[in-house]
Amino acid sequence: MSGVNIDWNRVAQEFGTPLYLYDFDHFREQFLKLKNAFKARKSIIAYAVKANSNLSVVKHFAQLGSGADCVSILEIKRALLAGVDKYKIIFSGVGKRDDEIEEALRLDILMINVESEGELQRVEEIAKKRGRPARISVRVNPNIDPKTHPYISTGLSKNKFGVDIETAKKLYLYAHKSPHLEPVGIHFHIGSQLTQLEPIREASQIVADLVRSLKSVNIDIRFFDVGGGLGIVYKDETPIDPYDYGQAILSTLSGLDLTIICEPGRFLVGNGGYFLTRVLYEKRNGEKRFVIVDGAMNDLIRPSLYQAYHKVELIGGEDGEPEPADIVGPVCESGDFLRKDVPLPPTKPGDLIVVHSAGAYGFTMASNYNSRPRVPEIALENGKIRLIRRRERFEDLIAPEIDYLI
């Protein structure tokens, strides 16, 4: 977990609360660890933009040579705007619209990651109209249990993602025969927050064997996309070492000349992000203690959505014995909490609470529920802080509606 020293009182005074702060130096260290894990082979580290899509964050990785894993056409446009090379961009996702497919082909990105027979047919039809073949990969579902939260498991047959091995073979044979499709890659991703190596190695072996069978019928797969999902430390997890991760995948690729694509998101940004919120006051309902803060579930929904644990740190506080408290926000929902039953000493208005490991799926999942403006984002790099997204204003919230006001 990032151990950077930050003057939180200064940050709060300069930018207000709540806010997100990202340690760009930590981001860089994580990227290089993963890049070095595959240094023995041709590889592309394609940052999963959905984890944290701030343009400055994406640009930071682009300047390190990163590609981009995108799940919407606007994520692709973000990546291009941030300086990512178009030939390092993959378009993934289950439900791509025709206009998104057409735009992705026009932008000439590396490949479209196909998730179903129906989608393959749409890509083929659109490519036919354009008069140029579409580079594609197929997302294979190896039916491996990733041993993670069910909401972020993607590699089992009951999940909506990808196709089974036999269906994948049929899609590759079809694509190989089509003059409008160019199958260049293969993809799998069994889930997120993975902390066990064996399911990854097992999935890689299954998909690598499929590549061998495809090559035997002259289908030239050049890109082996292993997805992302490497876990991080939120509480007491033991994460997978990047070197061991690389070796596990490489051990399955004997005799294959492939460029490895890895799509990390949380691993790169999770532990380098912080959510800062301010104590408003305390409240008791009988024996139940609440510390009410200005941050809420619309800012950071992971605790409410996934029952996710985030370490919290109190800056300030009064003398006294810690006792359990729920840290809750102003949103009008019982599910609006950042932590429950966390031991805290007495707090006073103005104290600060830092929520750790908030760099991934924090701001990017934020909403304007209760007409709350989304918070600013701050970068910390080489000891200096700078604003990379301002706090939204009321005018930002109503701008799409104001022209239609009667």
Image (cartoon, rainbow, N blue to C red):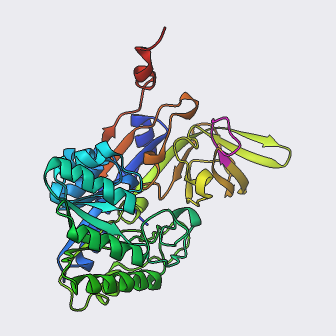
Which picture quadrant has residue 20? top left
Q: Residue at x 21, y 70 (%)?
A: 177
The location of residue 301, given as percent across then percent down, is 55, 48
323 or 305: which is nearer to us?
Answer: 305
Read off the magenta span: 327-335
Q: Is residue 185 above or below residue 7?
A: below
Q: Majority secondary structure of the magenta segment?
A: loop
Residue 334 lies in the magenta stretch:
yes
Indicate the quadrant containing the N terminus: top left, top right, bottom left or bottom right. Answer: bottom left
Residue 151 appears in the rendering: yes
- Outermost residue on the top side: it is 406
Which picture quadrant has residue 14? top left
- Outermost residue on the right side: it is 286
Q: Residue at x 55, y 76 (%)?
A: 147
Q: Residue at x 45, y 72 (%)?
A: 190
The location of residue 363, given as percent across then percent down, is 44, 46
Q: Is residue 315 above or below residue 168?
A: above
193 or 358: which is nearer to us?
Answer: 193
The location of residue 5, given as percent across then percent down, is 39, 57
- On screen, residue 95 versus residue 383, left or right, reads right
- Outermost residue on the left side: it is 131
The location of residue 170, given as percent across then percent down, is 34, 74
386 or 143: which is nearer to us?
Answer: 143
- On screen, residue 72 versus residue 330, left or right, reads left
Residue 216 lies in the magenta stretch:
no
Q: Residue at x 67, y 57 (%)?
A: 342
Residue 4 appears in the rendering: no
Count of numbered tags: 0
